[in-house]
Image: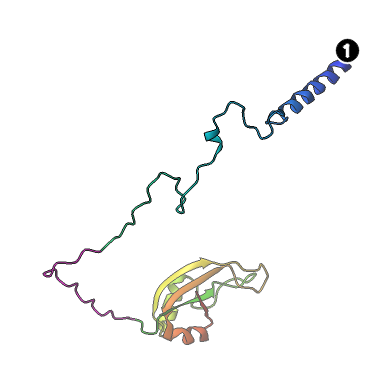
Amino acid sequence: MTKRRFFFIPMLLLVVLLGACGPSVPPDTPDGADEGQDPALEEAPTSTPLGLPEGYPAPDPVVMETPALPADYPAPPTPLPTVDPYPGGLAWVLRPVGIQCEEGTAPGYGDLRETVATMTAAGIEVVDAQMTDMMVTAVCGGPTSAHYRLHINADDLPTAVSLGWTAGQ
């Protein structure tokens, strides 16, 4: 008895599935149109070159004109000339905090404040200083992921490179 029940349930599900997945258009009408449907609904409305159905008026072109200023309207002030305090521009420089698998840091580069003081003592004006983490390979002798990042005058870049810094972005 239980074998018949297990056979009957899958067969019933198969019949229901096949019935649900049958054609949606009845087979006696060739293209699905009903016999009693209004023929005016079967035709698609024609459209105008603008894509509007017939009977709709064409849209009026909108012309935007800038109104004229009155004659007594004050002229805008002339912009003041700006003075670039760094004529050569600014540059970012990077230096790793330390070396992997080694203890300590280079003399003068223990922390960010000490690093800025070392650079100022070398005659390099530091505009901005920050710590940043960079992706590095994990290998002894390679740089650590923590780096000092300084924003300096671009004219001081050769001096910073001679001190072991690299130009960055």
Residue 117, image x, y percentages: 41, 77
Is residue 122 something that shows in the picture?
no
In this picture, which residue range is highlighted in magenta? 66-85
* Residue 99: quadrant of the picture: bottom right
Residue 82: within the magenta? Answer: yes
Pick whichever, 71 or 40, lies toward us: 40
Q: Is residue 169 above or below residue 61?
A: below
* Residue 78: quadrant of the picture: bottom left
Is residue 51 something that shows in the picture?
yes
Q: Quadrant of the N terminus?
A: top right
Q: Is residue 156 above or below residue 75?
A: below
Q: Is residue 48 above or below residue 33?
A: below
Left or right: residue 100 versus residue 15 is left
Residue for point 46% across, 71% down: 112
Q: Give, as a three-letter code, the residue at label 1.
A: Met
Residue 8: within the magenta? Answer: no
Q: Secondary structure at mark 1?
A: loop
Left or right: residue 41 versus residue 89 is right
Residue 91, image x, y percentages: 45, 78
Residue for point 86% across, 15% down: 2
Most extreme residue toward the left is 72
Residue that numbered label 1 is attached to:
1
Residue 153, image x, y percentages: 41, 81
Most extreme residue toward the front is 39
Pick whichever, 159 or 19, lies toward us: 19
Most extreme residue toward the top is 1
Q: Main secondary structure of the magenta part?
A: loop
Pick whichever, 56 or 136, lies toward us: 56
